[in-house]
Amino acid sequence: MVSPRLRPRKLSEPTISRLPVYQRIVEGWQRRGETSIDSRQISELAGVTATTVRRDLAGLGSLGTRGSGYEVDLLMQRIGEALGHDRSYQVVVVGLGNLGRALVNSTNFLIRGAQLAALYDSDPRVIGTEVAGHVVHSFDEELVPATVAVICVPPEAAQAVADKLVAADVHAILNFAPQVLAVPLGTAVHYVDFSIELQILMYHLNNGTGPLGGGLLHSLGIAATTPLRTP
């Protein structure tokens, strides 16, 4: 039986980055009708040690009797709660070029509780077209209320876009533009840079190690990383 919601203690950034990977693993177990999973099974698929898995999941509160594995349904619930999947989010995307369109059309783009509220662009050729069932609006228009914004614009336009989003009371930004943004305190910005992801992957390739976590791209299903095995 799934227990009531508990508020987990504050988690470290590395733990937060690994939780979506654990969630994918446990979700696969759940789809196959499995009722329990242990730290070793999770660790082998996630490319981390079993000790790391246990330490990460300990931050989610009590998950059963030590040594008996994790109840799949309860673990799915707790990870979802930690990642905010039990809340509602309105998401807007700014920039509907190749990357923006790929994200919006991805079946793994929106987490549970997230709803795509609006799409924006500044290109007259794109404004008024339909992407994933939504009409693209001009970014010059008044923005609809949103919880999260995704920026997929050229780097020279990113700061101006962020400024307007902040002025519209958006407090969480996922930035795919290779540009560091200046935002006020209280605004969360997460950067996704494919060149950085590739460099990290190349490091693991050249050193014969597996990436520890998988990161945001893994959780979105945009780029799947498989732990590298040494001969």
Image (cartoon, rainbow, N blue to C red):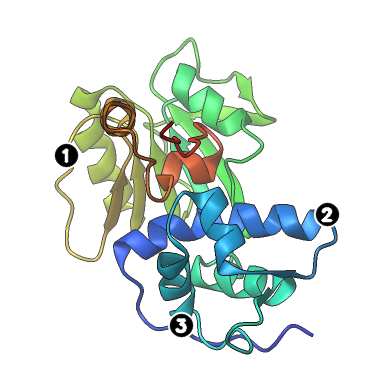
Residue at 79% over, 85% down: 1
Nearest to viewer (mark 1 / mark 2) = 2
The secondary structure type at the circle numbered 3 is loop
Nearer-the-camera pick, 5 or 73: 73
Residue type beneath disc 2? Arg
Q: What label does residue 32 carry, if any?
A: 2
Answer left or right for 57 relative to 29.
left
Nearer-the-camera pick, 64 or 169: 64
Q: CA distance from mark 1 to mark 2?
A: 42 Å
Could you tell me residue 136's position as x and y percent?
54, 27
- Disc 3 + disc 2, Cβ < 8 Å: no
Q: Residue furthest front?
A: 231
Among the two numbered marks 3 and 2 on one chain, the one whose residue lies closer to the N terminus: 3
Residue at 50% over, 15% down: 126
The secondary structure type at the circle numbered 2 is loop
- Disc 1 + disc 3, Cβ < 8 Å: no
Could you tell me residue 83's position as x and y percent?
50, 65
Q: Is residue 215 above or below residue 34?
A: above
Residue 83 showing in the rendered view: yes
Nearer-the-camera pick, 165 or 191: 191
Residue type beneath disc 3? Pro
Q: CA distance from mark 1 to mark 3?
A: 30 Å
- Quadrant of residue 66 in the image? bottom right
The residue beneath circle 1 is: 180
Residue type beneath disc 1? Val
The residue beneath circle 3 is: 8
